[in-house]
Amino acid sequence: MKSRTIILLALLLAGVALIIVSNRQGTPPKEVALGLTAPVFSAVDARSGRVLASADLRGKVVFVNFWASWCQPCKDEMPSIDALYKDMMHNDSFVMVTLLYKDSPSDALAYLKALGFSFPVFNDKDSAAARDFGVTGVPETYVIDRKGILRQRIIGGADWNSPEARSLITALLKE
C-alpha cells in the first residue's frame, strides 16, 4: 500500500514537472495586429549579404512579403510585386522587403533571375522574422507605416499592382 502511494505521488510530480517544462518551451507568440507596432526584425540581403534592420526603416513605408520559390500562390503574385517595386524603387520613402520562408536563397534567386524579377530578396535566418510576425504560411504580406505601425496584413496572394493596393501605399506615403 505504501509503495503504491509513493508510485502515484511520483507520477503526479512527474506530470506536474512535464506541464511546467512544456509551458516554458518556446516563447509565447507576440501580438501582431493592425494598429500595433510592427515586430522588430533583421534580415540578410540574399544578393549582397548586407544586413537590414527594421530600426533603419523608421520614417518609411515598408512592404514586407514572406514568400518561397516552391509556393505557387507566391509565384502568382510575383509579377505584381515586381511591378510595384519597379514603380516605387526610386521613392526614398518606400522600402520593399521580401523575406524567404523555408527556402534557400540560391533557389529563390535562380527563380527570380529566370523570370527577370528584380525586387530585393532577404533571408530570414532561423525564421525569426516569420515567428515574430506570426506568419501562418506563404505568401503573407504586411504594410507598415512611417511610424512603424502595422497598417495592412494580407494572408495569401494579392495583386499589388491593383488600384486598391496602390491607393493604400500612396495614402501611407502622404501621411
Image: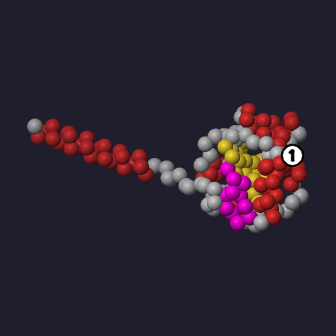
The amino acid marked with disc number 1 is: Ala
Q: Is residue 18 left or right of residue 61?
A: left
Is residue 85 visible from the viewing direction of this image?
A: yes
Residue underneath mark 1? 83
Residue sitting at 33 percent across and 48 percent down? Answer: 17
Residue sitting at 67 percent across and 43 percent down? Answer: 155
Nearer to us in this view, 35 or 125: 35
Q: Secondary structure at mark 1?
A: helix
| Classed neighbour count for the residue bearing mark 1: other residues with Cα under 10 Å, few (<14), some (14–19), many (≥20) | some
Q: Position of residue 11 (x, y in %)?
A: 25, 41
Q: Is residue 82 left or right of residue 42?
A: right
Is residue 56 visible from the viewing direction of this image?
A: no
Residue sitting at 55 percent across and 55 percent down? Answer: 30
Q: Is residue 149 magenta?
A: yes
Marker count (numbered): 1
Q: Is residue 170 above or below residue 98?
A: below
Q: Is residue 46 above or below residue 150?
A: above
Q: Is residue 75 above or below residue 119?
A: above
Q: Position of residue 140 (x, y in %)?
A: 68, 44
Nearer to us in this view, 110 or 91: 91
Q: Is residue 156 magenta?
A: no
Q: Position of residue 115 (x, y in %)?
A: 86, 36
Viewport quadrant of the N terminus: top left
Residue sitting at 69 percent across and 46 percent down? Answer: 154
Viewport quadrant of the C terminus: bottom right
Magenta-drawn segment:
143-153
Q: Quadrant of residue 33?
A: bottom right
Nearer to us in this view, 112 or 84: 84
